[in-house]
Amino acid sequence: MQQQDYVSQIHRCFRCGYCKFPSDYSSLNCPTYRRFRFDTYSTGGRLWLIYAWLKGEIEWSEHLAEILYTCTTCKNCTEQCPMRFAPDIVDWIVGARSDMVEKGKIPPRVARFLEAVYGYGNPFKLLRGDRAAWTNGTKIYAPGDEYLLYVGCLGSYDENGQKMARSLVDVFKAAGVSFGILGSDEECCGNEVYMLGEMGLFQTLVEKNSQKFKELGVKKIVTICPHGYNVMKNRYPALGASFEVYHYTQLLNDLVEKNKVKPSRNKAKVTYQDPCFLGRYNKIYEEPRQILRSIPGLELVEMEKNRADAFCCGGGGGNFVMDLLAGSKESPARVRVREAYATGADTLAVACPSCLTMFTDAVKAEDLDSKLAVKDISQIVRESLPAKKRQLKQRKQEGAK
Amino acid sequence: MSDIYEALVKIVGKDCVSNHHEERYFYGRDPGLMTPHEADYVVMPRTTEEVQEIVRLANKEKVPIVPKGAGLALTGLVIPLKGGIVMDMKRMDRILEVNENARYVVVEGGVSQGALREYLKEHHPNLRHSVPEAPPITTIAANVVIHGQGRLTNQYGFNSDMVNGLEVVLPTGEICKIGSCSVGPYWFSKGPPLPDLSGLFLGWLGTTGILTKVGLKLYPKKKIKDLEVFVTDKKDLVPDIIFKITHTEMVEDLAVWAQERPLMFRGNYHINIFITADSEDELEMKRKMVYDSVQEYVDSKDAGFMTINLDMRRDFMDNPQKSMTAFADVRRGGGFEYAGPIIPMELYPECARKVAELAIKYRVVYGGSGRVIHGGHCMMFSFAYTFNRADLDEMDRARKALHEAAEFVADKGGVLWKPNIDEQKIMMERMDPNTLKLMMDVKKLLDPNGIMNPGNWEAK
Amino acid sequence: MPDLKFEKIKCTGCKTVSCLVKCQYMDWDKGEAKKEWQKVINGEDSSILKDCVTCYACEEYCPFGNHPFYLIVERQEEKGILPQSRPITKQAINMTTAQGKFLVGKPEKTALSFCAIPRLYTLATGKLFEDVLPSWVLGTEFFCQAMFLHFARMSLIKENLPKVIDNIWNQGIREVIFLHDECYGTFTSLAPAYGIEVPFKSIHYFEHVYKKLKELKNEIKPLNIKAAYHRNCSARLVPETDHFVDDIFELIGVERVKREYDHENALCCGGLLLTSKGYDAGHDVQKRNIDDMVKFGAEYCVFNCPACWDPLAEKVARRGIKPIHMIDLCKLAIGEKQAVEVKV
């Protein structure tokens, strides 16, 4: 794979430090550098250390591995690096990781993540049979359905992710979308596995998934999670698995524009987190915003760092499980919820279950959980659907009695 | 040694000290050409008091300390030549005070150029500071310590001339205020009308103390900025052109550059003239004065203003100039270093000739540029050579080219800026012996145990 | 080297001496003009050769198509007169010297030429060009050479033009859509003036865009704006294309404000005046041009030439008028985004 190029290229990093910043240098924007503050934890540090390891000037150690695996692959560095090789930076890091995986040199948390995916089809090491526990009778995909709704591991197993999955299913049903899910037959998409460098396992996952999709005659896939969107759109085709892939916000925006989803008034002041795998990776910035703006009464305010400058939630690179950046008020999710709160918003809207779960924990750690609600866009839309609103009102009234 | 580690943990906390090989390796080198030397510890203090305790510890244990910003001077000044503690100052990143009316800011010793630029944009949009072209992570403190320059240098001098006061932790551990802030709450002067003690720290490359606070002059920020590029193919005309342009007193920054590639620049010397104004009338007045000042060269066809492509203009006007950093990738090798001697304007033509000559001799790619300092009293001329860090032979050739450049300029009477240890030797060899003795005596007085960035400014 | 098809007799019999009398940068009355022009014809020294700002307008003014401007350029070169400074001339030559690097898309029988101007590549996107893309050529190997008219280097044009023609032909291209007047002018005016054969068909992008807009008529939302048209120097070589400006404007709902410095009276963008003559000359021309736009209520200033953009677009924007290239203007009309913008 192309990441093997890193061996001949990685010395090109000048450690100039542009990778630490957003485009206006207003604050630190590399989640690991912000968290740890040693220069070694910035992209420049990482690349120089990988080069040193290749030259034999330093040996593999747990500390080196921590530096390497705390990278959330958020691509801020790619966005900011002034050099011609900027687009390749994450590939280089993945390349180094894949070499380390081959040599069996990975830290325990990473090993556990990969083993869980291998054995259980998800990184949480939860039973395959429980993957569809959230579904509540959601239709299983059958040939002829327009979309396969690919739920993903977070959507299937994570408490917050499941809420997201349920609300999206409700919204799709209300809009009359023809879709189905794979249920407990669903397997990990492999995005984090790829980013962690386990190429063998990644290839297996792609083959398994692709086989399943082909057998079912799937043409269009819509994912809940931007990680899944990213890998299926950008990595699967090279392995022969080519489908039309959408993130749900693209489809939902389309439905809103065509009036198939008609949100009614929902007074809220909302700020939106651009997920790395939707934003920087795939340049999808406007559709989620358009959905939010379509809701009457909703005021959308921007965080200072948004779109290509958005600050990562810290969940990428498997860290929504491994959480290697936890433990400090400078942990990225905590930093970001503070930034969200500073806009005056009462709601932090997300479009990614990793962001959802990271921020849900972070608002608690920041004592903001009564002040800043963290909701996925599909949850906000679902709340704004007239039937739903009536339901909520009714429940409130009954509660009052 | 592990006692030192434990002692450092006690001072700054476990998360802010490292004796891991990875940190010792990384902090033991910079992206230039100087030979690396690993640190024993890397520490990141948050407060002046923590810095003080570390310095006291270092004195007690006779362990070197090397204060570090971003390490992008490229001349190896943050490489711990004798091991010891590298003190990464960047956690001391608070902007403490802006006095708008007196136009100054007080920052901690690790505040970055980028952070200050943005802070002022947001909170004091009519004020700016002199931002160097170095990457934005570089610190205010390190920049003044090495007598750096920036976008206001033609107008106001070296960035160190813009210092308005200091808080320093002396090598013996005392915390010292320098300038007007030593007698009152204001930071409007680094010395006058008192004896100017700032000279004990600025230019000493971290060998006489650690800057924990810097007071810095701010300047008016105008609404419109523009760039003109005046081009001549005769390097001998450059000093006079600069003389004429600076006579207008209308230009905030003035830089001369020449390079072989892209082809359109070959064989010419380009003078970037930055002007700013609050109104169209003011801008056009300044533009006209600049144009008129060099009209004779336009009439003789020896020079002309370039019509600048707006994309190129945007790159030049970007401050810091991100495209300058990309010089490091010309050889697809992530490296460049430059000797940037300070010279009188009249030496420009010889330096411009020499930088190209050395590039041919040593088969390296060059960039030759100069930044005019304070209205043309002098100029920083950059002999920049880029190299592929995976090609040891090329690195060696670049090193030789730089060394020869340094010797050449020193022989002509130029003064080597932010000198690496070889260049320091070149300077000290040529220095007035009494001046050198004074320097060494001051250094010894301030740093009796020789712990501050040892290996630098050391005369045999 | 090919000779200019210049006929002395046409000038001898000329009653109007429009080339010099109408010149906006020199002040000649008819009698004096006739005498002075004769010096140029004869190859003698003349102030015209130094004072000419190379705006190309006399090519348009001459009622006989006798190429007075091309003759001026020839004479300037013969006498070693530099309209621009020596270093800027060197820069222009260096910038456009062929490198043997053929930057091409997938050239077919019909292709777009971006000349050596990357900005044209940026502009040519969307529905207006989707039928032709990715058939394009770009770079010094396809450089039209006309720029050297500003530098008294007719010799370079004559030397290089045949090579460029070959380069285009050898890509299999038989029909070229030129996105710049200079290019279109080179192959339809300059080349014939020297008897240089152009084997392929030249199409002005105005014509192409107009045709496409008519096809996309249902997608056009009239812009309903007033625009000043900045008529560039090379438009003088191809005045027969000017009607397309009005045709396109009509189709997309743009009013071409009837201002003083338009059509034959258009002013140079001032770029080369600033660089060759000095501040007053260039600034005066720019100020008059923009004042004129403001006076007649223009909301937009439409550019045809990317080289005028650099000296003028920001100045226009600072006076509250939005600068926009013709291609971008057409894109706005069909709901596409402006590719090249200036922010002040």
Image: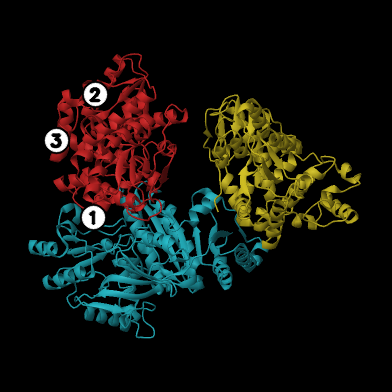
Q: Are marks 3 and 1 in contact (CB under 8 Å)?
A: no
Quadrant occupied by the C terminus of chain C: bottom right
Q: Position of residue A389 (x, y in %)?
A: 35, 33
Chain painted yellow: C
Residue type at the position of mark 2: Asn
Task: Look at mark 1 in the image and give the residue it sits on.
Answer: A38
Left-right relation of C207 to A396: right
Quadrant occupied by the N terminus of chain C: top right
Task: Look at mark 3 in the image and give the residue it sits on.
Answer: A112
Chain painted cyan: B
Report the chain holding disc 1.
A
Q: Are marks 1 and 2 in contact (CB under 8 Å)?
A: no
Colouring mode (rainbow / by chain / secondary structure / one colour):
by chain
Q: Secondary structure at mark 2?
A: loop
Q: Is residue B177 above or below residue B381?
A: below
Residue type at the position of mark 1: Phe
Task: Look at mark 2 in the image and give the residue it sits on.
Answer: A136
How far apart are the two marked residues, 3 and 1, measured between alpha carbons?
27 Å
Q: Residue C152 or B198: which is nearer the viewer?
A: B198
Q: Is residue A14 visible?
A: no
Q: Mark 1, mark 2: which one is toward the viewer? A: 2
Farthest left residue in view: B3
Left-right relation of B398 to C260: left
Q: Position of residue B24 (x, y in %)?
A: 19, 56
How far apart are the two marked residues, 1 and 2, measured between alpha carbons?
47 Å
Report the chain holding disc 2.
A
How far apart are the two marked residues, 2 and 3, measured between alpha carbons?
30 Å
Q: Secondary structure at mark 1?
A: loop
Q: Earlier in the sequence, mark 3 or mark 1?
A: 1
Q: Earlier in the sequence, mark 1 or mark 2?
A: 1
